[in-house]
Amino acid sequence: MPKLVLKAGSRPPWVGLAAAVWVQIAAGNSYNFPLYSSEIKSVLGYNQQQITILGVANDIGESVGILPGIACNKFPPWLLLLVGTVLCFFGYGVLWLSVSQTVENLPYWLLWIALCIATNSNAWFGTAVLVTNMRNFPLSRGTVAGILKGYIGLSAAVYTVIYDMVLNSSSSKLLLFLAIGLPVLCLALMYFIRACTPASGEDSSEHVHFLFTQGASVLLAIYLLSTTVIGDTVSLSGTISYILVAIMVILLMAPLAIPVKMTLFPAKKLSSAVNSSDNLVQGEGGSTQTNPLLTPTSSATYLGSFYENEEASDVETLLAVGEGAIKKKSRPPRRGEDFKLREALVKADFWLLWFSYFLAVGTGVTVLNNLAQIGIALGVDDTTLLLSLFSFCNFVGRLGSGVISEHFVRVIIMS
């Protein structure tokens, strides 16, 4: 069945990006560990060493992404999201049964495995939306990665607001929300996270749309931090709390304004004749046929010109790579191309990235897992403000890295 051909400025990729924002918030559920670790320690009578080992399970589950990484090239995104919802439901469900004492005396090893399973849903959620959207926007992969990773960094602040203003700072209610609310959310958005044939050229308004999305995420970050500070400083009534949460939800829906704008104010076609001629090829016997953007034949044509002509279009190459149409030659892949695992393991770049990620992210998750105990040691019983501040800084780093990387990639391509 031929794929849908989409022109520059088509709505489906932007709808998928708006839905991916919510899935990324769900994918940040591992950042909630400081919110309920103290409750596990007090209710179940665990010592600090046992809580630290549970934090290791939290990190292992979040970080082990080799299975969803392999699956994303073989199965559609909705299947990865489905696996993530199942893991989230069963993992956090077991933790809720234990913390709420619905089921008593669950063994420690079972809770360790349950937490590992629960946070492993992050890898499935994140891989599904990140890979899909980077393929849908091949010319802006750094920007898309920065936006989506930025929202997952903001997820801790989002959960903090929900924890304080909706769940009344109840750890058992938070675990129940994670076990039921997140799977329902991802199931509802599953249809919108799907691969779309990328536009054949760069749309002039695409840059403006990305700037709007980045601006909306920055506004959300400032709002979340401000709301947490206000909630920690003064006592808010139930009505005010729900209003603040409603504003947060509206800000989370801001990326949806882009496809809505495309629907209400469609871009004018300057030359329909040119557009139609670009999609027609001469068939056998002189007949005219439609040329799908990413059929194997057209992608193979891109491949031939890629190695023989140095001036081949970067767009065509990216589309051909994403569709799997490029046939590997005898030479090893170059930097920027797709590597198999065995090919990557012998590259210095791979190990440089691995050690950088290990050292940088490792220190962050170490602080995060012990954030509640750090706050208690400093005389701060309520660690929600610390977690919200951590989330804000996490967001700034993630969004900034995407913007900076995209800038340098474009500079290199233009040079």
Image: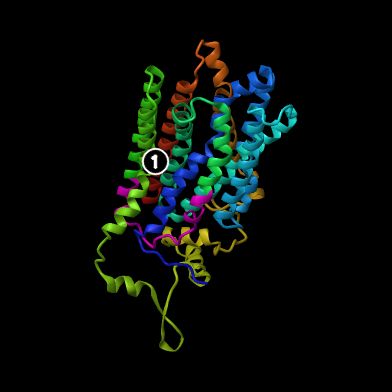
Q: How crowded is mark 1: few (under 14 residues within 10 Å), some or many (20 or more)?
A: many
Location of residue 192 in the rendering, given as x and y in whole percent from the top left corner: 47, 55
Query: Which one is nearer the viewer's eye here, 401 or 351?
Result: 401
Q: Is residue 261 shown above or below 304?
A: above
Location of residue 100 in the rendering, given as x and y in whole percent from the top left corner: 63, 28
Asked whether residue 337 appears in the rendered view, the answer is yes
Q: Residue at x 42, y 29 (%)?
A: 392
What range is drawn magenta here? 187-211
How many labels, in total? 1
User: Which residue appears farthest toward the bottom when viewing the image?
Assistant: 285
Q: Is residue 301 shown above or below 180?
A: below
Q: Is residue 116 left or right of residue 26?
A: right
Location of residue 80 in the rendering, given as x and y in whole percent from the top left corner: 59, 51
Q: Residue at x 48, y 25 (%)?
A: 387
Q: Name the residue under label 1.
A: 252
Q: Is residue 268 left or right of residue 140?
A: left
> Does 190 lie within the magenta span?
yes
Query: Which one is nearer the viewer's eye here, 90 or 109?
Result: 90
Q: Identify residue type, mark 1.
A: Leu
Q: In which quarter of the image is residue 267?
A: bottom left
| Colour setup of the view | rainbow
Asked whether residue 349 appears in the rendered view, the answer is no
Q: In this view, does 104 lie to the left or right of 398?
A: right
Q: Is residue 31 shown above or below 18?
A: above
Q: Quadrant of residue 106?
A: top right
